Amino acid sequence: MTDPGGWSGSGPTLPPLPPAPSPPPPPGWLPTYPIRPVEVPPPPTDAARAIPLDTRGLVRESLDLLTRPDSGLRGPSFYIGFIMLVTLAPLVALFGLLVVQGQGMFGAGFAAGYDNGAGSGNLAWFGWLSLGAIPAMLGYVAATVEARALATAVIGARAEGRPLRLVQSISLARKRFWPVLGAQMLIGFVTGVITTIASLLVLAVIGPVEPVSYGVQLALGLLLGTPVVYVPAGIVLGGTGVFESIRRSFGLAGARKRLAAVVTLFGLVSQFVVLFGLNAGLDAVARFIQGAGLAESFPPPLVVPLTAAFVFAIGTLVFLVEAIAAAPPVFAFIALTHYTWGLEQGRRDPVPVRHFWDPWVTLGLALAAAVALLALVGGVLSLSG
């Protein structure tokens, strides 16, 4: 008999029961998959908290660090001098040998030698010179960028009271090389365009007045450099990229405008004084050598070692200039932010030291040095021939 409600005798389908909960883990149980801990920056050190925020005290403390015997700047300065020695010195030595031999800038009769078919030697020398210019240019760019990153790392570590070893500071400078280079190129391009336009306007209105031109360049350097004065510190100490460092530098400079302007002006004036003194000294030496007739009677075998010593000294001076310019912004950055977590990249992952040339020489530097040495040997042989 059929049920009037259409029920056929079998009950409705019930939903499945939920699964039973898993038993609690036994004591001491650990998961089988790795857990990555979240790294939290340590609290700022007492040395970082003690940095004064007033302008006079901050600049005085940064200068005290530069003049201390334990500043840690000697090793990095030798490293920058070594880079310029192996890349730039061969090119300078070629010019020095040419001057000593009294053949002019491009050899005797460089232009007229083609009239009598005797220009092949000069052409060969010019080819070796062009080859030597490639590693010289690359070495100079690398030295200046690494000098800024090294100075920022060394001074920042000393300012927070946890100094870096030389291998750690070099490792950090290499890790932050490309961001520092990108920031310098971007800021330099914008600053250069604006400065060129302003200089042309001053030249058109006033004329070629050198003191006015220097004053305009200094004023524009202060105006344009103040908002970005903390960019290298943001890249090296903060561990951020180019654009993020620029954005944060604008924020820090806007928060303490007077402090940013003072540290920017201090860096500009110190660089100007050092470079002006170097230029005046080199000019005096050149005039003395020319007036005394020492260029024609100078022994050619001494040109190469003296040139090497001179270029090495210039490299150490390049680092000194960068350190003087970087010290106040680094101290101001730490005083404002109490953040130096970017230095941990150098402490935790330094360059492995397996050979006697570590950490001084990389593969790229070795190749550049080999090309520079080849250009020097080829140029000497073309001059002697």
Image (cartoon, rainbow, N blue to C red):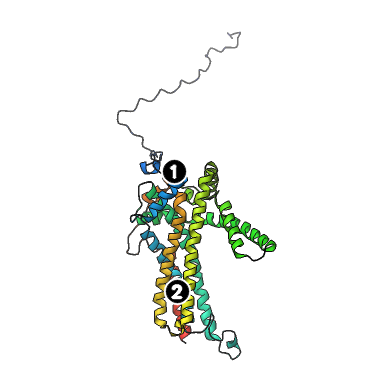
Dot 2 surroundings within 10 Å: few (below 14), some, or many (20 or more)? Answer: many
Q: Picture coordinates of residue 100 (x, y %)?
A: 46, 82
Q: Picture coordinates of residue 117 (x, y %)?
A: 58, 90
Q: Which of pointers 1 and 2 indicates the residue nearer the eye?
A: 1
Q: Amino acid at mark 1?
A: Ala
Q: Residue furthest bottom?
A: 116
- Circle 2 sits in a helix, a strand or a loop, which is it? helix
Q: Tell me, for residue 90, which label it has, or none.
A: 2
Q: Residue furthest left?
A: 28
- Circle 1 sits in a helix, a strand or a loop, which is it? helix
Q: How many marks?
A: 2
188 in relation to 304, above or below: above
In the foreground, 282 or 357: 282
Question: How far apart are labels 1 and 2 at the CA level?
Answer: 43 Å
In the foreground, 385 or 337: 337
Q: Earlier in the sequence, mark 1 or mark 2?
A: 2
4 in relation to 61, above or below: above
289 relative position to 188: left or right: left
Q: Amino acid at mark 2?
A: Pro
- Residue at which label 1 appears: 335
In the foreground, 171 or 101: 101
158 relative position to 10: left or right: left
| Quadrant of res 90 | bottom left
Q: Picture coordinates of residue 348 (x, y %)?
A: 37, 49
Q: Picture coordinates of residue 367 (x, y %)?
A: 44, 68
Quarter of the image for the N terminus: give it: top right
